[in-house]
Amino acid sequence: NHNHNHNHNHNQTTMSTPHNVLDAIDKLDASDQHIIKCYIAELQGVTPPEPEEPTEEATKNTNKTHLPQYDPSNGEDFDQATSYKMEASDLKSAGDYPAALLKYNSAITTAPPSALLLANRADVLFRLERYQDAVTDCNEALLKNPDSAKALRIRGRALKELGEFEMSRKDLAASQQIDYDDGAAEDLKFVTDKMKEIGADHVKVKLEEEERKKKRAEEMRKAQEAAKAEEAEARAAKAEEAKARAAEAGMGGMPGMGGMPGMGGGMPGMGDMAGILNDPEIAAGLKNPKVMAALTSMMGGGGAPNPAKLMGLMSDPEVGPVLQKIMAKFQGGGMPGMPGMGMPGMPGMGGMPGMGGGMGGFDADNDDEDFDDMPDLDDLPDLE
């Protein structure tokens, strides 16, 4: 039945419609074809055809724009275009927008269209709720005349219906500056309020996002501080462990250093022995068996070290540097004077034999008495 009705309607349309017009109609989408066929049917006084059920291919192309445009290869007829424009204007004023669209299409394809003609067709497209097509015509109109208030106003209204509130607000505001319109003022207020709502929502989302970022940054900062603290504690523990191992190794390798006899009872001013042994050069030297043997030999006699032996050890290329390092540590921490390296006072030098016992030690406590026993030089005989 559908095919029968389609053929019947097509036959009715072809009764007085040229084949080239029918070919042009077939190139349009289903909705435009129906508008044109209804208009032709009304002119012919026949029953308008029923809308055809869209095919699968037609459904895929419903969002595509099919607006007749001017083709320079077809020539130009401005008089005829003017006639079409006047008819279209009358039809639009009468509210017959489908018929007005057909006339505007004819006017546009007959001669190069002006910005105003494109804006008028966009107005009809807007009223037919073909908002995207209306935007397309307005874009073309504004290329020809960027100050077309009508094109700006219609595009702004179409964008409002498409939900593009920011672009709609810009177009409507621009059109109002050129040519004020009460309807456009209401549309502008609507999209402005929408933008405020969207802006408030955007600000809220942005604030929430910033709060999340700040919280995340604070968590990362705390984690970094905790990691640094743990690393510092690990370094300190490692250093303390190394220090303890070095002290244990050094103290265990120097037998008989319990006071270094002959040096005034335990090396006065020695301070912290572990601190001395922590010196890496001393610790390394004490691992040398030759150095340890020399120290053991030097301090194992129970008295002061032999100066000659000490000098010999000091000249040894392996032992000498270690001894010098140890003595330097002792001197830096005290060891006031190192009195004779254990040779305290050289007591009396035994009276210096050969001098008849005179100057017997020069006892400091009896120095006045000794000098009283000496003869007066005036009493000596004159040897001349």
Image (cartoon, rainbow, N blue to C red):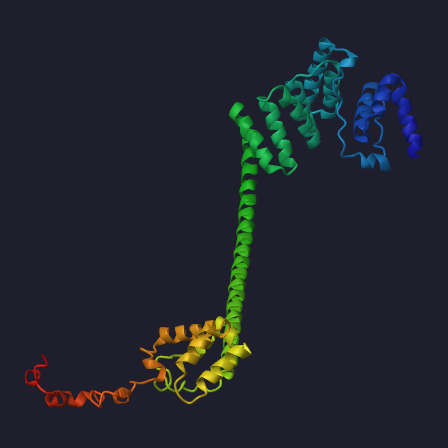
Which quarter of the figure is the C terminus placed in? Answer: bottom left
Residue 355 in the figure: left or right of residue 57:
left
Q: Is residue 179 visible?
A: no
Residue 327 in the figure: left or right of residue 383:
right
Q: Position of residue 284 (x, y in %)?
A: 52, 73
Determine which quarter of the picture holds residue 159.
top right
Q: In this picture, is 198 found above or below 304?
A: above
Q: Residue at x 69, y 27 (%)?
A: 136
Determine which quarter of the picture holds residue 58.
top right
Q: Which of 122 and 144 lies nearest the eye of the viewer?
A: 144
Q: Which of 146 and 314 lies nearest the eye of the viewer?
A: 314
Q: Which of 368 and 268 lies nearest the eye of the viewer?
A: 368
Determine which quarter of the picture holds residue 146.
top right
Q: Position of residue 147 (x, y in %)?
A: 57, 21
Q: Residue at x 17, y 89 (%)?
A: 365
Q: Residue at x 56, y 32 (%)?
A: 170
Q: Position of residue 375 (x, y in %)?
A: 10, 87
Q: In this picture, is 285 found above or below 205?
A: below
Q: Is residue 23 visible?
A: yes
Q: Position of residue 226 (x, y in %)?
A: 52, 66
Q: In this picture, is 47 found above or below 255?
A: above
Q: Which of 95 and 259 lies nearest the eye of the viewer?
A: 259
Residue 306 in the figure: left or right of residue 336:
right
